[in-house]
Amino acid sequence: MRLLIGIGAGLLALGTVVSLHGPVALTAPNRLAVLSASAAIFPDPDPQDYSIFKEKIPVAQAESTLPAQTLAVAKSFLGTPYVSGTLESKGPETLTINLQQLDCWTFMENSLALALAARTTAPSLDSMQYFVQKLRYWGGAIDGYASRMHYFTGWLLQAEKSGYLKNITRELGGIPYRKKSDT
């Protein structure tokens, strides 16, 4: 087990990405800050995942904006095996990091978490794990299977609330659409 004591916070709006709710702007950490009063403890990484992490950080750091960093990391995953259900396991819910195999959700989530980690003052696998946990679990807290987000709309809303994304649909001329139910 390793101890995480703090990584980047501060927010700065950058770029755009298309989502189910329309375009959103990615935001990025730009200063060192302590994340919480209590430190998070993460499991020791798989050596292959750690090696992949170390390869991806310079890929992200070669770009200047969070959207460009996220896209560069995503492109660097080309050729990585697609495996469905990479987060499903027996036993209690734990933070799973698997950079050797991805599904559609972990592909997107790991790309953003790696880009966010690369923007911290001292990128580490702990910082990436922190961002994955903040992105993957309601309120960033692991409390069983139900605490993991299972719908992308929830993921988008929490990422926006956490400051990682900004919905810019209205800024681009979009209008809200609410489907009326006949029931």
Image (cartoon, grey):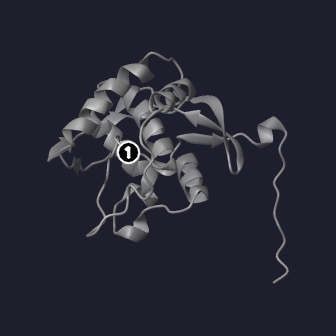
What kind of residue is marked 1?
Gln
Left or right of residue 90, residue 163 in this image: right
Tag 1 secondary structure? loop
Q: Quadrant of the C terminus?
A: bottom right
Determine the residue positioned at 51% across, 43% down.
108
Q: Position of residue 70 (x, y in %)?
A: 51, 31
Q: Is residue 2 above or below residue 75?
A: below
Question: In this orientation, which residue lies closer to the viewer: 133 or 89?
Answer: 89
Q: Residue at x 58, y 35 (%)?
A: 26
Image coordinates of residue 103 in percent, x first then y, are 47, 50
- What residue is disc 1 on? 101
Q: Given the current orientation, which residue lies at the most extreme left position? A: 1
Q: Is residue 169 left or right of residue 56?
A: right
Work out which residue is located at the far bottom of the displayed protein and give it: 183
Q: Which residue sits at x=55%, y=34%?
A: 27
Picture quadrant where residue 94 is located: bottom left
Compared with 58, 70 (above or below) is below
Residue 93 at x, y percent in the picture: 31, 65
Q: Is residue 42 left or right of residue 72?
A: left
Q: Residues within 10 Å of mark 1 (few under 14, many from 20)?
A: some
The image position of residue 1, as x and y in percent, is 14, 47
Instruction: Answer above or below: position of 155 versus 18.
Output: below
Q: Is residue 128 visible from the viewing direction of this image?
A: yes
